Amino acid sequence: MIKIEHYTYRITWSPTDEEFVGLVAEFPSLSWLAPSQVLALEGIQKCVRGVVKELKQSGETIPTPLAERSYSGEFKVRIPSLVHRALVLEAAEENVSLNRLVSSKLAR
């Protein structure tokens, strides 16, 4: 059973709308405007609850919350050969593996 509270919510100010906007990472097309942060969160959660209910009723796939997904810690990325060479040289100069160097750069 999906708990809508486990989804990844973000509340930010919208200068265009002059209100707070509630967003949810797992449903990027959804948003909710409100005059306060609390109301924006409550509104976007209510919206998500409705969408999840509709998805259930229609038999469609309901996104798993990011917090409940498993991550291997591995992903592949393609980069230009010159960038690859520069990173290998930098790793060698710092006496670390290429993996450790790239991992530390991504963590910044």
Image (cartoon, rainbow, N blue to C red):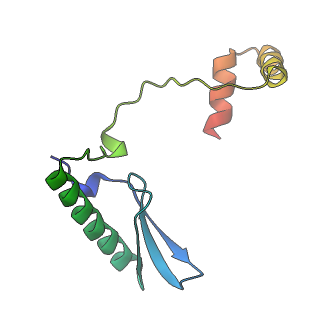
Q: Quadrant of residue 87?
A: top right
Query: Taking 33 as reference, is 2 left or right?
Result: left
Residue 20, position as x, y percentages in the image = 47, 78
Residue sitting nearer the eye, 82 or 60: 60
Q: Look at 35% across and 31% down and name the residue there.
A: 70
Residue sitting nearer the eye, 62 or 75: 62
Query: Taking 80 as reference, is 59 left or right?
Result: left
**Which quadrant is home to the C terminus?**
top right
Residue 25 position (above or below residue 85): below
Residue 105, position as x, y percentages in the image = 68, 33
Q: Quadrant of residue 15?
A: bottom right
Q: Look at 34% across and 43% down and name the residue there.
A: 67
Q: Quadrant of residue 90?
A: top right
Query: Taking 65 as reference, is 100 left or right?
Result: right
Instruction: Give the farthest residue toward the front.
Output: 58
Counting labels gives 0
Residue 106 position (above or below residue 98): below
Q: Look at 32% across and 46% down and name the residue there.
A: 65
Query: Taking 82 as reference, is 67 left or right?
Result: left
Residue 63, position as x, y percentages in the image = 31, 46
Residue 103, position as x, y percentages in the image = 62, 28
